[in-house]
Image (cartoon, coloured by chain):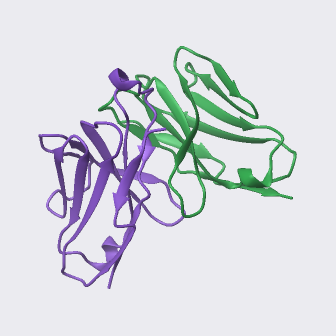
Amino acid sequence: GAVVSQHPSWVICKSGTSVKIECRSLDFQATTMFWYRQFPKQSLMLMATSNEGSKATYEQGVEKDKFLINHASLTLSTLTVTSAHPEDSSFYICSARPPFSSGGTGELFFGEGSRLTVL
Amino acid sequence: GENVEQHPSTLSVQEGDSAVIKCTYSDSASNYFPWYKQELGKRPQLIIDIRSNVGEKKDQRIAVTLNKTAKHFSLHITETQPEDSAVYFCAAGDSGGYQKVTFGTGTKLQVIP
C-alpha cells in the first residue's frame, strides 16, 4: 500500500512555543491531506483538510490561527501548533489517499502520528 | 455535515466467537463506508470498505453489510482471534481525493483467549 510518513513521532515543548509537524506522502502525490486530533481512547477528530497550493479548510471549532496548515508541495503538508499550551497536548495524525489516476481506491493511508506534550 | 454513531464502545468476546459492530450515519449523500483497525500505539489501517452500490462485502473472516435505506452499516468478524483485539473505527463519506470521511467513536474489541 501507499506510504504516509509523519515527523516527529513525539515532541515535548514548553508552553508558549510553536511546534511544527510534517506529513509526507512518500510514493504518491497528494493534492489533499487531512489532519486529525485523537484524544486517549477517543475517535479521530478531523481538524482540517489541507489543500496543495491553497488555503486549508478547517472544521467548525478549530482555531485557524492556532493550528496553521501549509501544503506547499504535492507530497508535504505541515501543521504548526502556535503558542502551544498544555491543553494542546494530544496525538496528531495525518492521512492522504492516492488519486484514482494513480491506482488509488479511495483508501486513506495514515501517518504514524505525532504525540505532542506541552509542559 | 455527516454524523456517525458507533456501538458498542467496548466489546469482549471469547476466542472463536463472532463480533459485531454497528454504525449509523446521517448524510444520505455518503457513498463510501470504510472500517479501520487501530492497534495500540499504531496508525489506523483499512480492513474493509464498502460502497453504496453494494449491500454486503466479505473478505475471509471479515464482512460488512450496508443498509442505505436505514443508514446503517455493520462489521462482522467471525472466528475471532486474539490478534483481532484492537480499536475499530467505522467511517462514512466519499472516496474522492479531496473528500473527507467522518469517523465513528470507535469500538475497543478484546478477544479473550
Q: In the image, what residue occupies the spot 30% across and 43% down?
A: A33
Residue at (76%, 34%) from the top-left corner?
A: B61
Which chain is represented by green in the image? B
Whether residue B108 appears in this view of the structure is: no
Query: Would you place residue B73 above or below residue B52 in this image?
Result: below
* Point 42% across, 45% down: residue: A3
Place of residue A87 in the rendered image (x, y in percent of width and height, measured from the top left): 33, 75
Q: Colour of chain A?
A: purple
Instruction: Give the vertical position of A51 relative to B9 (above or below).
Output: above
Q: x and y percent of residue A43 in the render? A: 49, 54
B110 over A108 or under it: above or below: below
Q: Position of residue B58 (x, y in %)?
A: 69, 25
Count all numbered tags in the image, as a single digit.
0
The answer to which of B95 and B31 lies nearer the viewer is: B95
Quarter of the image that includes the C terminus of chain A = bottom left
Q: Is A29 positioned to the left or the right of B85 in the image?
A: left
Residue B64: quadrant of the picture: top right
Outermost residue to the top: B53
In the rendered image, the residue lying farthest to the front is A27
Is residue B5 visible in the rendered image? The answer is: yes
| In front of the other: B46 or A59 | B46
Left or right of A84 in this view: A109: right
**Residue B108, percent across and down?**
65, 56
For residue A113, side relative to residue B111 (left or right): left
Residue A12 found in image quarter = bottom left
